[in-house]
Image: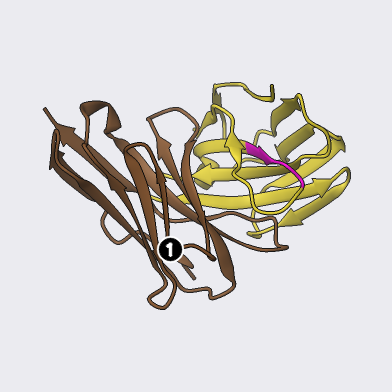
């Protein structure tokens, strides 16, 4: 069966510090991978998605970047965090075919102080 | 530009009654719709989906209805249970885009 791992669960970082959140998927090959953010009082905002190694699509211009160094690994990064980067970050995956559901990780609560 | 909208931020329903959660979309290219349930500090879990070739899909206590002409879908939960209390998100996808666009969510509270 497929599983998705996302870590850390919580993170408190000072303004201006770097960020690296990692997500890995097991039990499937060539998944589509996604990073979403849920800010306070808002819905799930799609940040990045990837349909293959090295292929990253950015949905919202902002202080973040994403990379996919391996087939089942997706990394969210920032060089210098802003207060506005605080939120609940979610990684998700879906199979690479037609219309199917996406499966989410447990999320990372990021607080920038 | 919010392409998927959930205009009711919250809903309270008595246990055993029907819960109806609504969702509207603006992009006519969307042809696949999903509902997710989310508890605090957890990732969303998939509930049910519907393709645009259908107008209804049922799975146990959950039924999703799609009205393409109105660009509207709804999730019916019957009977509602206290464990259904959570935030519900609708999402939409257009074929070939690989993206899931989510609404802002509706917080459902089922009262015992």
User: In this orientation, does residue B45 appear?
Assistant: yes
Q: Which residue is mark 1?
A: B55
Residue visible at 77% across and 46% down? A96
Tell whether A66 sits left or right of A92: right
Residue A32 at x, y percent in the picture: 74, 44
Which shade of the palette goes to chain A? yellow
Q: Check the picture and name the quadrant holding the C terminus of chain B.
A: top left
Marked residue chain, label 1: B
Looking at the image, what colour scheme do you see? Answer: by chain
> Is A20 in the magenta?
no
Q: Is residue B71 above or below residue A41?
A: below
- Asked if residue A41 can be seen in this view, the reply is no
Query: Where on the picture, by quarter, is residue B24?
Result: bottom left
Query: Residue B1, percent across and down?
Result: 49, 71
Q: For the point 63% across and 47% down, which residue is it?
A: A100
- In this rendering, would B82 be left or right of B5? left
Q: What secondary structure prevails in the magenta region?
A: strand
Q: Is residue A10 left or right of residue B56?
A: right
Give the chain coloured brown.
B
């Amino acid at each position: 069966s497929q599983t998705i791992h996302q870590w850390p669960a919580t993170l408190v970082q000072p303004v201006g510090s770097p960020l690296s959140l990692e997500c890995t998927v097991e039990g499937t090959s060539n998944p589509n991978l996604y990073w979403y953010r849920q800010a306070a009082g808002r819905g799930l905002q799609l940040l990045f998605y990837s349909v293959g190694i090295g292929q990253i699509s950015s949905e919202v211009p902002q202080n973040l970047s994403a990379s996919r160094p391996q087939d089942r690994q997706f990394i969210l990064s920032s060089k210098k965090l802003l207060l506005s980067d605080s939120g609940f970050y979610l990684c998700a995956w879906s199979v690479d075919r037609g219309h199917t559901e996406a499966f989410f990780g447990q999320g990372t609560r990021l607080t920038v102080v | 530009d919010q392409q998927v909208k959930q205009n009711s931020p919250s809903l309270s329903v008595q246990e055993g009654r029907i819960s109806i959660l609504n969702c509207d979309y603006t992009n006519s290219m969307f042809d696949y719709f999903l509902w997710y349930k989310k508890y605090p500090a957890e990732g969303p879990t998939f509930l049910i989906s519907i393709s645009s070739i259908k107008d209804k899909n049922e799975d146990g206590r959950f039924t999703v209805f799609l009205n393409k002409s109105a660009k509207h879908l709804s999730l019916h939960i019957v009977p509602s249970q206290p464990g259904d209390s959570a935030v519900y998100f609708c999402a939409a996808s257009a074929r070939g885009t690989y993206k899931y666009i989510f609404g802002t969510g509706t917080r459902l509270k089922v009262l015992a």
